[in-house]
């Protein structure tokens, strides 16, 4: 009888120990996944906030370069994400008008890399927004754009982590109408076109955590080119290869074409 009681007591003890062990493991697993879920949502929220700030930065950059001038800053508060200012990020871009070189640049860029738990679904053009997926690559590769189109693009991609990139590689072409110039005592009428370009230049970098980036317009150059023809042809070369060509025709009853090339030089710095 005593042996039976002892065995029964041992069985209860073993059962209790097993149940406690199972409960401990279950609680541990629950805590692990709970912490992982919290960490994931924290990193994702930080990445999405940084993405929104990059989109805002694109607008601020255009305002500084082509609008109000001066400077603007955007403050990033990063814990798991990383901000990179990248020199010579893109390939060499050269723009020619009727065979004359008017713009040459190897664009710099701004990049946000998400935390280790964040991922995106591949390449996506964020600004300007494109609803048709079949048009995304065409819009990204476009360099010559019309009035009203943004000069600064923002895209996201999955490449060794989730990344958002701000890049200036576009030339905006705008027809201004017919302008009259006095040359040698005589008045000549020209169909006038304007080419605008933002040259973003990574300047001073440094700092971590609560980190502002500052856009400062340091110079604007304006060069004028006069052609006898009533039309102009714009060629864009990337790394020595022609990737885009556009011919623009002005009025028929003019003496030629006038092309104004406006380049805004904008420094981007970090202070922290």
Image: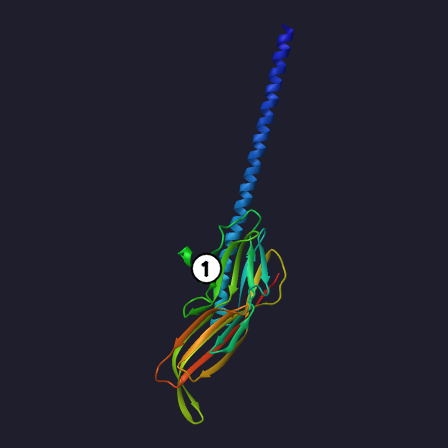
The residue drawn where x is 56% and y is 41% is 36
In this view, the residue in front, 214 or 130, is: 130
The residue drawn where x is 58% and y is 37% is 32
The reply, left or right, for residue 132 in relation to residue 88 is left
Q: Which x, y percent locates residue 161?
A: 56, 51
Q: Which residue is mark 1?
A: 137
Residue lying farthest to the top in this orientation? 1
**Residue 127 visible within the image:** no
The residue drawn where x is 40% and y is 75% is 248
- Please tell me in which quadrant of the rendered image residue 87 appears: bottom right
Query: Is residue 68 positioned above or below 190 on the image?
Result: above
In this view, the residue in front, 226 or 32, is: 226
Q: Which x, y percent locates residue 21?
A: 60, 26
Question: Where, quadrant-wise, is the N terminus in this rendering?
Answer: top right
**Residue 209 visible within the image:** yes
Q: Which x, y percent locates residue 149?
A: 42, 67
Residue lying farthest to the front in this orientation? 241
Residue lying farthest to the bottom in this orientation? 185
The residue drawn where x is 40% and y is 88% is 188
Query: How many numbered marks have been drawn onto this rendered protein structure?
Result: 1
The reply, left or right, for residue 124 in relation to residue 12 is left
Q: Secondary structure at mark 1?
A: helix
The reply, left or right, for residue 82 in relation to residue 169 is right
Q: Which x, y percent locates residue 90?
A: 55, 64
Q: How is the image coloured?
A: rainbow
């Amino acid at each position: 009888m005593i042996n039976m009681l002892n065995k029964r007591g041992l069985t209860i003890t073993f059962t209790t120990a097993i149940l406690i062990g199972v409960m401990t493991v279950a609680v541990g697993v629950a805590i692990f996944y709970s912490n992982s879920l919290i960490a994931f949502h924290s990193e994702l929220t930080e990445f999405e906030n940084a993405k929104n700030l990059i989109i805002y930065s694109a607008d601020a950059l255009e305002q500084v370069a082509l609008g109000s001038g001066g400077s603007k800053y955007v403050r990033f508060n990063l814990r798991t994400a990383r901000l990179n200012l990248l020199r010579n990020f893109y390939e060499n871009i050269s723009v020619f008008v009727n065979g004359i070189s008017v713009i040459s640049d190897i664009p710099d860029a701004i990049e946000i890399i998400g935390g280790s738990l964040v991922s995106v679904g591949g390449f996506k053009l964020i600004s300007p927004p494109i609803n048709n997926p079949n048009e995304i690559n065409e819009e990204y590769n476009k360099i010559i754009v019309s009035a009203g189109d943004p000069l600064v693009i923002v895209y996201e991609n999955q490449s060794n982590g989730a990344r958002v990139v701000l890049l200036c590689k576009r030339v905006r072409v705008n027809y201004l109408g017919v302008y009259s110039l006095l040359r040698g005592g005589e008045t000549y009428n020209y169909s006038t076109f304007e080419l605008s370009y933002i040259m973003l230049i990574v300047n001073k970098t440094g700092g971590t955590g609560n980190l502002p980036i500052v856009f400062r317009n340091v110079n604007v150059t304006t060069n004028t080119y006069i052609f006898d023809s009533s039309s102009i042809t714009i060629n864009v070369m990337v790394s020595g290869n022609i990737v885009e060509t556009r011919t623009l025709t002005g009025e028929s009853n003019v003496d030629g074409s006038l092309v104004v090339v406006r380049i805004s030089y904008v420094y981007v710095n970090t202070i922290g």
